[in-house]
């Protein structure tokens, strides 16, 4: 079993003119397998061990939080790990891939075109021919066992924190689906797409939720805060992240949590959360994916309590 330490709550906004904003610092739940990755990997790792596997194989891009977390988890549990990387190898390795390799993960680079086949049976058979036996964890770690883990996380949150809105960044949609199912209708769940034109994620999440007997309608996905798409950023986002670090000692990444918090504060300023409500945001980790801060004259207009 992976080590776990429950993340603390950090109060960001208590001014009575705005809804209360609280952040669950789940980025602090584990030194390396942080945030939602801990919950998505929990039952996958247990299944791999129960089935007697000694090697994990999974997929990701060059800045994948999932690859980083899987490599660390495998090392902690004494397992081997293989990462199938989208795109050609670029040396020196970036910090994410260098960390994965240093933790024993074997990196195997494939073309972007070939990578699109990562869920196809024929491709998986080719990987078995190449690497032998392994336990397969899909891209981003999203599968039924991941959702099971996230549902457990949702139960924990629901039992320990009072909120009206639960906010989180969305990549593959697995964490969002698990939280919706696990909250069992409590509150309103708001996902912030980190992908450009992320509207398709609504159908993806709904498909995952089709496995849940009770339909839930208390969720939505915001698609206006991707800042250009996955792993893309803007000067305004960098300015925002620096300011959150300086004023609240709150580290955010430019791929996931920075975009979510940018969106939440913009929506607070626009009055899109009910007066007197409590907004709970989930810090899902991923800080290793930070890009170097770039100087910028672009600023973000915060609600008045931040000025």
Image (cartoon, rainbow, N blue to C red):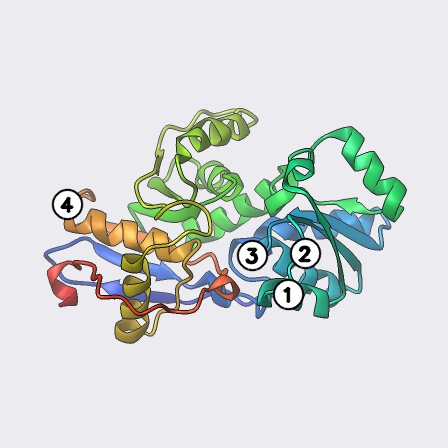
- Where residue 110 appears, as percent x and y from the top left, is 71, 45
**Disc 2 element:** loop
- Where residue 15 appears, as percent x and y from the top left, is 14, 62
Give the quadrant of residue 101.
Answer: bottom right
Q: Nearer the viewer, mark 3 or mark 1?
A: 1
- Disc with the residue nearer the chain's start (3 vs 2): 3
Mark 2 burial class by Cα count in 10 Å: few <14, some 14-19, many 20+: some
Q: Quadrant of the C terminus?
A: bottom left
- The residue lying at 59 percent from left, 63 percent from top is 96
Q: Nearer the viewer, mark 3 or mark 2?
A: 2
- Disc with the residue nearer the chain's start (4 vs 1): 1
Q: Nearer the viewer, mark 3 or mark 4?
A: 3
Give the quadrant of residue 191.
Answer: top left
Q: On the image, numbered disc 1 is attached to which residue?
A: 93
In three-dimensional space, the C-alpha distance between marks 4 and 1, rounded to whole angstroms, equals 44 Å
Q: On the image, numbered disc 2 is attached to which residue?
A: 89
- Which disc, if any, is residue 40? none
Q: On the image, numbered disc 4 is attached to which residue?
A: 271
Q: Quadrant of the N terminus?
A: bottom right
Give 40 or 256, whichever is nearer the viewer.
256
In three-dimensional space, the C-alpha distance between marks 2 and 1, rounded to whole angstroms, equals 8 Å
Give 207 or 103, whichever is nearer the viewer.
103
Count of numbered tags = 4
Q: Left or right: 150 with respect to 193?
A: right
Q: On the image, numbered disc 3 is attached to which residue?
A: 63
Residue 161 visible within the image: no
């Amino acid at each position: 079993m992976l080590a776990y330490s429950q993340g603390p709550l950090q109060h960001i906004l208590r001014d009575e003119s705005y809804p209360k904003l609280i952040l669950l610092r789940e980025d602090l739940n584990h030194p390396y397998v942080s945030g939602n990755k801990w919950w998505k990997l929990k039952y996958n790792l247990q299944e791999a061990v129960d089935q007697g596997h000694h090697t994990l194989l999974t997929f990701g891009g060059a800045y994948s939080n999932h690859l980083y977390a899987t490599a660390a988890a495998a090392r902690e549990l004494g397992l081997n790990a293989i990462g199938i990387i989208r795109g050609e190898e670029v040396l020196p390795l970036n910090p994410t891939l260098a960390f994965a390799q240093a933790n024993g993960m074997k990196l195997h680079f494939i073309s972007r075109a070939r990578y699109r086949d990562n869920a196809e049976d024929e491709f998986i058979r080719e990987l078995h021919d190449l690497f032998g036996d392994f336990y397969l964890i899909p891209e981003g770690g999203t599968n039924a066992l991941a959702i099971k883990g996230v549902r457990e996380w949702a139960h924990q949150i629901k039992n320990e924190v009072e909120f009206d809105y639960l906010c989180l960044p969305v990549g593959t949609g697995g964490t969002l689906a698990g939280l919706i199912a696990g909250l069992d209708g409590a509150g309103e769940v708001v996902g912030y797409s980190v992908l450009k034109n992320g509207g398709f994620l609504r159908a993806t999440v709904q498909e995952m939720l089709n496995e849940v007997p009770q339909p839930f309608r208390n969720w939505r996905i915001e698609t206006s805060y991707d800042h250009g798409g996955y792993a893309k950023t803007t000067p305004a986002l960098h300015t925002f992240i620096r300011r959150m670090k300086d004023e609240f000692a709150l580290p955010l990444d430019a791929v996931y949590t920075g975009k979510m918090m940018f969106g939440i504060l913009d929506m607070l300023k626009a009055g899109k959360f009910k007066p007197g409500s409590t907004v709970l945001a989930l810090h899902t980790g991923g800080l290793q994916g930070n890009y170097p801060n770039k100087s910028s004259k672009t600023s973000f207009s915060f609600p008045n309590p931040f000025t």
